[in-house]
Image: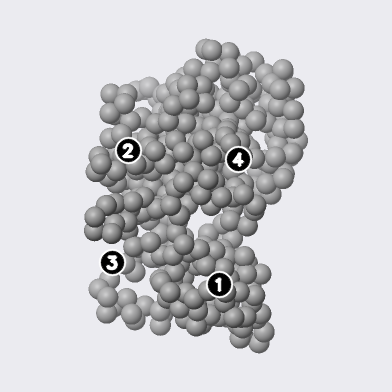
Amino acid sequence: MNISEILKDYDLDNITIGVLGGHSALDVCAGAKKLGLKTICVAVKGREQTYDKHYKTKETDYGTTGCIDECIVVDTWSGLLEENVQEELRKRNTIFIHNRYFWTYFNFQDIENNFKVPIYGSRELIKLEERDVPNNQYYLLEKAGIRIPQMFDIPKLSYKDGVLSMEEPKEEMNKLTLTKVSNAIRTYERANFVASNWEEWRSLAEGKLNDGEILIDVLQLAVIEEFVLGAQINFNFFYSALNDTVELMGTDMRRQTNLDGFLRLPAKEQLKIPEHVNPFHIETGHVAVTCKESLIEKSFIAAENFIKACKEHAQELIGPFALQGAIETDGKKEELIVFDVSMRIPGSPGISATPYTGYLYGENISMGERIAMEIREAQEKGELARLLT
C-alpha cells in the first residue's frame, strides 16, 4: 500500500487522531486533546456509549469535558474497512493509532492491504506478536539476547470420542509449565493451563477439549513454556524514531478474571475450585506497580537491544511497546525473563501513575500524551510521513 500517495491529499497541519473503540482508545484521545489535536473514534454498535456519550467532547459551564470529538458507529468491527468509513477518516486527515483490539478483530492481511488510512507505527511488525508466524517475537527476543522461558514442543495430537492421544514427546517435561492456548469462543483470550509432566498435560488438555473451552487444531499450535516463578512486571516503553531515544513510560502487572479471585483464596480452598469452575486468564485490567532502581538499567538494556533486533531482523519499531515478563532470582542476582511482547500501545493507562516519566519530564505523562507529543514534533519538523505506514 502506497501511504505516501494518500498523504498527498492530507493537510498534515490539520490532522485528526483516530482510534478503534476499545483497549486504549480513551488514553490515546485524552493525550491527543491535551496536545490540541482533534480525535475520532470508530466504535462497534453495542459498545459505543463510552465514546459517543460518556466521554464525548462537550462544552459545559465549567469548560470542555471529554476527549472524543467524533464517533462513527459501525454494526460490526469489519465496518472499519468499509470504503465510506475510510473515506470519512481520510477527509479528516486521520492518523490511526493501532491497539490490540485493532489487530484482534481483523485479518492481518486486511489491515496491511485494505485499510487505506495512515497508521502511526508499523502495520506489519505487529503480527509478529503471534506465536504461529515465522520470525516472531521469540525470534526477535533471542536475537536481542533477552532471556525467554524454556520452550517445549507439542507432540502430534489426535482427539476422538472425548479422548486425547499424543505421540511420544521429544523431550521430558521436567519443570512446571504454562500452556498458552486460545479460548475456543473468545479467540483473542487464552485458556491457559499449568502442568508439571506430560501425562498431567494430556489430562488437563483433554478436559478442556471435552468442555469445549479449546479446539484441537488450536491446541496443536499452542505454546508450552517454562512457568517462571518470579515477580511479574511489564516494562512499557516508548521509542522515539525521530530522536533515536527510548523512554520507560511506566510499569504494571495484569489482572485476570477469574484467576485473581482464585489467587486470593487460601491454598486448601483453591484445591476445591476446579470441582466447580476453572480459573480463566481473561484480561480484565492492570495494576500499576513499581520496581527497584537496580532493575531499571536492565530493562533499558533489554529495550534497546530489542529495538536494534527489530531494525536488523524485521522493521523499525516506532512508538510504544512493552516487554512483559518477570524478575527471577537464583538467590545471588536478579534477571529479567520476557514471555510476551506488545509491539504497539499496551492496554494499561494506569502506567502513568508510576513515577518514571515524572523523573524524565518533571510530571507524569500517559502513553497517549507521549504519542501526541511525538506527532506534534514530527509536524513541526516536517517528518510526520516518516512515522506512518
Can see residue 227? yes
Q: Is residue 82 above or below residue 105?
A: above
Residue found at x 65% / y 43%:
74
Q: Earlier in the sequence, mark 2 or mark 1?
A: 1
**Front position in the image: 126 or 107:** 126
Tell me how the rendering is colored.
Answer: one colour
* Relative image position of residue 130 (x, y in whole percent): 59, 53
**Residue 307: image x %, image y %?**
50, 36
Q: Which residue position holds label 2?
A: 297
> From the viewer's perspective, is the residue at label 4 or at label 1 nearer?
4
Mark closest to the chain's N terminus, 4 or 1: 1
Image x and y of residue 336, in percent: 36, 50
Residue identified by numbered label 4:
313
Is the C terminus in the top left, top right, bottom left or bottom right quadrant? top right
The answer to which quarter of the image holds residue 115 is top right
Three-letter amino acid code of the residue under disc 4: His
In the figure, is residue 265 to the left or right of 59?
left
- Does the CB distance between marks 2 and 1 fall below 8 Å? no
- What is the quadrant of the N terminus in the image? top right
Which of the labelled discs sits on residue 280, or is there none? none
Q: Is mark 4 on a helix, strand or loop?
A: helix
- Are the residues tagged 3 and 2 within 8 Å (C-beta)? no
Residues at circles 3 and 1 in contact by the CB criterion of under 8 Å:
no
Q: Do the residues labelled 4 and 1 touch (CB within 8 Å)?
A: no
Report the Cα–Cα distance between label 2 and label 4: 24 Å
- Label placed on residue 264: 3
What is the distance, in whole Å, between disc 2 and disc 1 at their CAs?
41 Å
Which of labels 2 and 1 is toward the front? 2
Mark 2 vs mark 4: which is more N-terminal? 2
